[in-house]
Image (cartoon, rainbow, N blue to C red):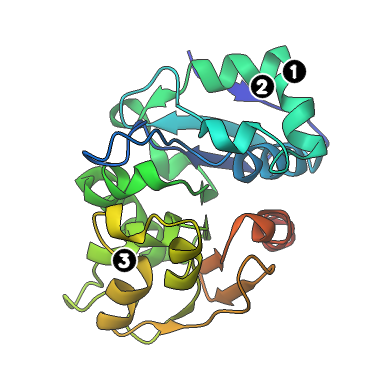
Amino acid sequence: MNTVATKKTNNIQKRVLLIMSSENEIGISGKLTGTWFEEVATPYYKMVEAGFEVVFASPKGGLAPIDLLSMKPPFTTENTERFVKDPVANFALANTISLESIEYLQYDALFFPGGYGLLWDLANNSLVLKMIQDFARVGRPIAMVCHAPAILRDAKKDNGEPLVKGKELTGFKNAEDNEVELLQHLLFSLEDELKLRGAIYKSKQNWEPNVVIDGFLMTGQSPASAPPLADALIERLK
């Protein structure tokens, strides 16, 4: 049974697959992590209220971990507080669908919230890479915020070139990782790896909202970019 949240406004309802990490630790550092809460909560509510069906998925299925730091002030928002009190949203988070059981081509878009855990599972997941490559091939939108663009590191075009080669994009920058003193604990640097693969990486000041759109690829730099990225995806699908 699919875990979904819906609000029907017409007969043709757009479907968005929201894919989260199943990892709750930053490698062997002992530091806990998970998906950044605001990057789930605000896009979730924006898309549901736009009339979309939102399905939560993760590599392992079941409960997808949320970064505990993102559940505390000053990182909480009106929508994270709303999510905590929302039984439907919490049920969806606790019962994500395993990626292997999803017929992903039935969806109109992919949305990847950020968080450090995805560097250890989603970025190395062959099924996730296939999803991205299949969506890119037909031009369906792929929205990724914060660390999520790191998942693009090993994605390829049909000709074998990196998928990001020549694409304008953004994502959590090295300076932001350094500011929270975590760059040295990471499996790899999003900014460095995507630049090495020919991406045209564009950033703004640390923590400033920044959304970059290049065809099917829609990326946001940091948590503050999640709301405008969700708005841009909604506009694209409408």
Q: Residues within 10 Å of mark 3 (few under 14, many from 20)?
A: some
- Amino acid found under the numbered disc labelled 2: Ala
Residue 44 position in % (x across, y down): 68, 38
Image mark for residue 86? 1
Name the quadrant containing residue 181: bottom left
Secondary element type, mark 2: helix
Query: In front here: 48 or 208?
Result: 208
**Tag 2 and tag 1, C-beta contact below 8 Å:** yes
Query: In front here: 7 or 96?
Result: 96
Residue 3 appears in view: no
Q: In whole angstroms, how far apart are the C-alphas of marks 2 and 1?
A: 5 Å
- Amino acid found under the numbered disc labelled 1: Asp
- Amino acid found under the numbered disc labelled 3: Ser
Query: In front here: 230 or 216?
Result: 230
Q: In whole angstroms, how far apart are the C-alphas of marks 3 and 1?
A: 35 Å
> In this rendering, is residue 79 above or below 194?
above
Q: Name the residue under label 3.
A: 189
Q: What residue appears at the point 77 percent right and 40 percent down from the top-left corner?
A: 77
Sequence-wise, the earlier of marks 2 and 3 is: 2
Secondary element type, mark 3: loop
Q: What residue appears at the point 57 percent right and 20 percent down from the top-left corner?
A: 92
Residue 127 position in % (x across, y down): 25, 44
Q: What residue appears at the point 78 percent right and 31 percent down from the top-left corner?
A: 8
Residue 231 appears in view: yes
Q: Name the residue under label 2.
A: 89
Q: In this rendering, would 11 be left or right of 66?
A: right
